[in-house]
Amino acid sequence: MQPDLWRKRASATTGYCLRNFWEERAKKFHPATPADPKALPWEFMWGNGVAFSMLVGAGDKERIAAFFDGLHGYWDTNAPVPGYDAYLSSPGNSDKYYDDNAWMVLTFVEAYEKTGERKYLLRAVEALRFVLSGWDEKLGGGIYWREDRKSKNTCSNGPSAMAALAVGQHLNPRYYTAWAQRITDWTNVRLQDSDGLFFDNCDLGGKMERTKWTYNAALMLRTNLSLWKGTNEKHYLTEANRIAIASEKVFVEPSTQAFRDEANFSHLLVEAFLALHEETKAPYLRTRAEACGNFAWTHLRDSDGGHWTKWRIEPNRQQTRKTLMDNASVARLYWLLGR
């Protein structure tokens, strides 16, 4: 499919998000439409990260800048190591996730690369400092999921390694590459299964939560691919291909030909497949990415232009609300396909 068609789909879905979730005066996004009167009014940090990546994909410099300002209220300057709280920051009420901050590092670096505005790179460095503060030597290393320090998750280590590499493209490459290798090596030892995919997490007693998610494979695939590009060590490219082949085998739903997880997970594996396709030109990678995009456009999109949550041929249309997370994830997926 031609890139311009994907960009039209991306633009339409981004427009839906801006019409239904964006609050211009507050410079923030609401989490759902129609609004849930029992819910908090603004999106949590995970969803903010996806929405920011949507705006970066669109190249919307004005709203990128506005939303960056709107996120200041989430940034906890009073913490020993400042970082983004899960919700609007307040003194004495710290609630930070290391993965939330790693996602922001990735999208801030991309914003810097697209706009040339150094403030995004500087905030990426600050957020990455918080992310790396989540490492300790319990279980031999690894970055915790959140500040309660109860588990070490692939979803915090994969994006953290990739975040280090992203910053290292612009600053202190040796330092950040060493961090990425350290995190990757630990994750491979502690959380990777024999098939190449990754378990969700392990607690400090060593108990494994064995669920495998698309986004965990995605970030470890991208990390290995980036390490290959940065070090020219062939085993990293071999590992990236191994993760992709395992993902194609395990994560594809036969009835849809799309990845089985919802958009907030699967758009990240689409991104990883497209990055690997750019390097290797293996046809199945682009084919699978486009199958995910076509499935979302054909089966999840409603008459109002918004997308539902469940990745099924017949999603649950009794659902009363559409969410920012679902729609920003699909918009980001379309922007990726339109590059």
Image: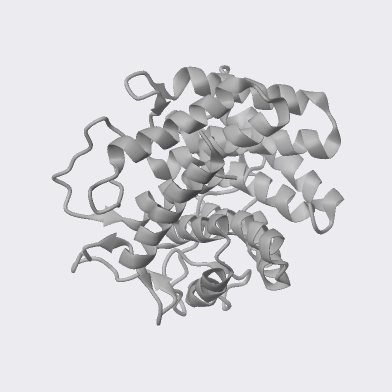
Q: Position of residue 161 (x, y in %)?
A: 67, 45
Residue at the location (73% across, 48% down)?
165
Please tell me which residue is depicted at 47% across the width and 80% down the height of the picture. Answer: 91
Question: Can residue 154 be spotted in the picture?
Answer: no
Query: Where on the picture, by quarter, is residue 114?
Result: bottom right
Give whichever of 236, 10 is nearer the camera. 10
Q: Compared with residue 57, is residue 220 higher up or lower down, i.e. above or below?
A: above
State the residue in front, 270 or 339. 339
Quick check: 256 left or right of 223? Answer: left
Q: Position of residue 256 (x, y in %)?
A: 34, 25
Residue 310 in picture, x, y percent from top left: 28, 39
Residue 36 vertical position relative to residue 302 in the rendered view, above or below: below
In the drawing, does residue 13 fall left or right of residue 215?
Answer: left
- The residue positioned 36% from the left and 33% from the top of the image is 295
Left-right relation of 155 to 12:
right
Q: Is residue 206 left or right of residue 313?
A: right
